[in-house]
Amino acid sequence: MTHNALTPARLLPWASPEGKPCYLLTDGSGRLSRAADIAESVQLGMAGDLLAHLDDMLGDEQVTAVQLRYLLARMSEALTNVCRIAESRGARLRVYADARARPGPDG
């Protein structure tokens, strides 16, 4: 899915209420693009925080199974978000790389 030859549809960092992917046709400079950038930044930060928390918990002999299950559930959510961000960014990079590889109008 592309808006034009150089601008791919952006996979947004959230899903629809039905769990389906959401896409945006944009040049990357609009308000919704900026909101998506902020959401991605927050999601990546949260994933990093969860990893740090896991590292702390693994070193703690008093951690319960309930605490670990809760953390793993949040990490599953974070990993889903990180994978969506990676897919979105990878798709945009491929389109730009393909466009750069094509010869220009002067040959």
Image (tube, rainbow, N blue to C red):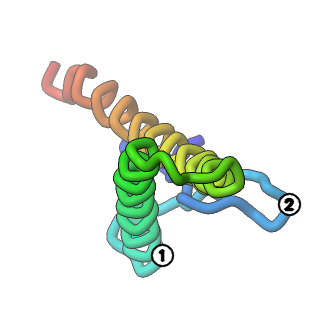
Mark 2 and mark 1 residues within 8 Å of each other at the beta carbon: no
Quadrant containing the C terminus is top left
In the picture, the disc for residue 1 is none
In this rendering, the answer to whether 74 lies above or below 30 is above
Residue closest to the far left: 106
Pick the front one: 74 or 35: 74
Q: Position of residue 62 (x, y in %)?
A: 52, 53
Q: Position of residue 30 (x, y in %)?
A: 39, 76
Q: Amino acid at mark 1?
A: Leu
Q: Position of residue 90 (x, y in %)?
A: 41, 35
- Name the residue tied to disc 2: 18
In the image, taking residue 46 as reference, residue 81 lies left or right, namely right
Q: Position of residue 92 (x, y in %)?
A: 40, 41
Quadrant containing the N terminus is top right
In this rendering, the answer to whether 97 lies above or below 9 is above
Q: Is residue 99 visible?
A: yes
Pick the front one: 42 or 15: 42
In the picture, the disc for residue 32 is 1
Under tag 2, what secondary structure? Answer: loop
Instruction: Identify the residue shown where x is 44% and y is 56%.
Output: 50
Residue closest to the far right: 18
Q: Is residue 7 visible?
A: no
Instruction: Identify the residue shown where x is 31% and y is 36%.
Output: 96
